[in-house]
Amino acid sequence: MIQGERLWQRLMELGEVGKQPSGGVTRLSFTAEERRAKDLVASYMREAGLFVYEDAAGNLIGRKEGTNPDATVVLVGSHLDSVYNGGCFDGPLGVLAGVEVVQTMNEHGVVTHHPIEVVAFTDEEGARFRFGMIGSRAMAGTLPPEALECRDAEGISLAEAMKQAGLDPDRLPQAARKPGTVKAYVELHIEQGRVLEEAGLPVGIVTGIAGLIWVKFTIAGPAEHAGATPMSLRRDPMAAAAQIIIVIEEEARRTGTTVGTVGQLHVYPGGINVIPERVEFVLDLRDLKAEVRDQVWKAIAVRAETIAKERNVRLTTERLQEMAPVLCSEVVKQAAERACKQLGYPPFWLPSGAAHDGVQLAPICPIGMIFVRSQDGVSHSPAEWSTKEDCAVGAEVLYHTVWQLAQGE
């Protein structure tokens, strides 16, 4: 039923908005590029027969009424913003597939008991203000007031950017949904990994979204001359950092489910011939079970302290962020499972290591996700790619999942 060609053409057209010379996409929140993207998607929503509006957080919403307009709403969607020089599938696939689902329903005269709303959330990525999921937090009523003071690289605060975009930060509480008004939230998203590709499957059903902690390590010692300081006398923060990073890998591997990453490292003063006086790096640690993740962190912390003592360097750690794991709803998972079977695809279960807007919505409604195969597992890159065929399959599974959720009580 889904028109895969129409979905693909819209994905490619939207991918031109914010396109960089590298071929990547940069669409940051509350910018001209984001506005163009929203306007384009709003036109798709109107073409699909939806009532279109934006809430107080700038979330773009298209509504298809149900036979009972007072029934709880089924939400489906994702986001339109990107990281710097990202791809054209991360986020837009979920929004445009949602539009395709309701347009297909309308074209075939399909009615549902529950209303369906397609939502494009504001600033999921957090690339501009280093604080993400702004729209979904606002919808859940959990956006902290201090977030409005987050600033971008130009010194512009989130509140100022909202005003420049024609929004009133003081009205943000109006974006919050009242308890009991949302039946479920479903999101189609690219996997951003290689699990489905290794399994030879186009789609998978997400079991839950991993919880993360970010911990900043600072290791300090004396800056000394690289040539004049014997190895036996060194108190080298960089050597200690290297050893601790190996520990992170070892401890994360032990569980079979935990992932640990150091993707940011700074060395001071940064001279080729100077033993560093300070090294800073940030650990990203994730697992679907908070207790497992926390046990891994404790093991890393104990071994890191031992390394620091043995090397006679100073070690401090600072927890920058913590996010609890969120399990997907059985109701949504079962609907997706039935959809896969109906379409002839074996149900395949996998966790999401990446965070998504559903994390923020979980306190107010059941959530679920469907993953589409990513080519080579690449994401947040111009090389991000999912095939036309896989996107269409994902949209078909989404269609039958949403249809089930929007029927009956």
Image: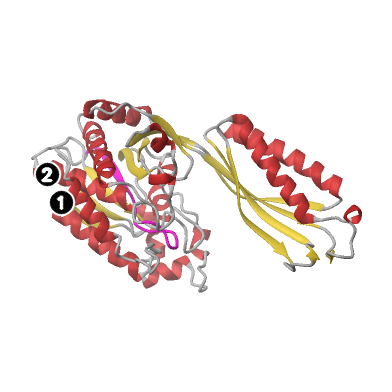
Check disc 2: other Cα within 10 Å, few if <14, some if 14-19, many if 20+: some
Judging by the rendered image, the residue that carries numbered circle 2 is: 106
* 185, 386: nearer the viewer: 386
Q: Is residue 288 magenta?
A: no
- Left or right, residue 52 beside residue 294: left
Closer-to-camera residue (334/258): 258
Quarter holding the C terminus is: top left
Do the CB atoms of the residues marked 1 and 2 lie less than 8 Å apart?
yes
- Between 337 and 201, the residue placed more toward the observer is 201
- Residue 202, x across and y down, in percent: 32, 37
Query: Dot 1, crowdedness within 10 Å: few (<14), some or many (≥20)?
Result: many
Seen in the picture, residue 198 relative to 77 is either above or below; the reply is above
Tag shown at residue 48: 1
Camera sees residue 219: yes
- Which quadrant holds the N terminus? top left
- 346, above or below 274, in the image: above
Residue 409 in view in this figure:
no
Give the quarter of the image for residue 165. Answer: bottom left
Residue appearing at x 33%, y 27% in the figure: 347
Percent of width and height locating residue 141: 42, 49
Q: Which residues are magenta?
A: 71-87
Report whether 287 appears left or right of 105. Answer: right
Q: Earlier in the sequence, mark 1 or mark 2?
A: 1
Horizontal arrangement in the rendering, residue 216 relative to residue 127 (left or right): right
- Kind of residue at disc 2: Asn
In the picture as drawn, the residue positioned furthest to the front comes out as 227
Identify the residue at horizontal 57%, vertical 35% (top origin): 258
- Amino acid marked by disc 1: Ala
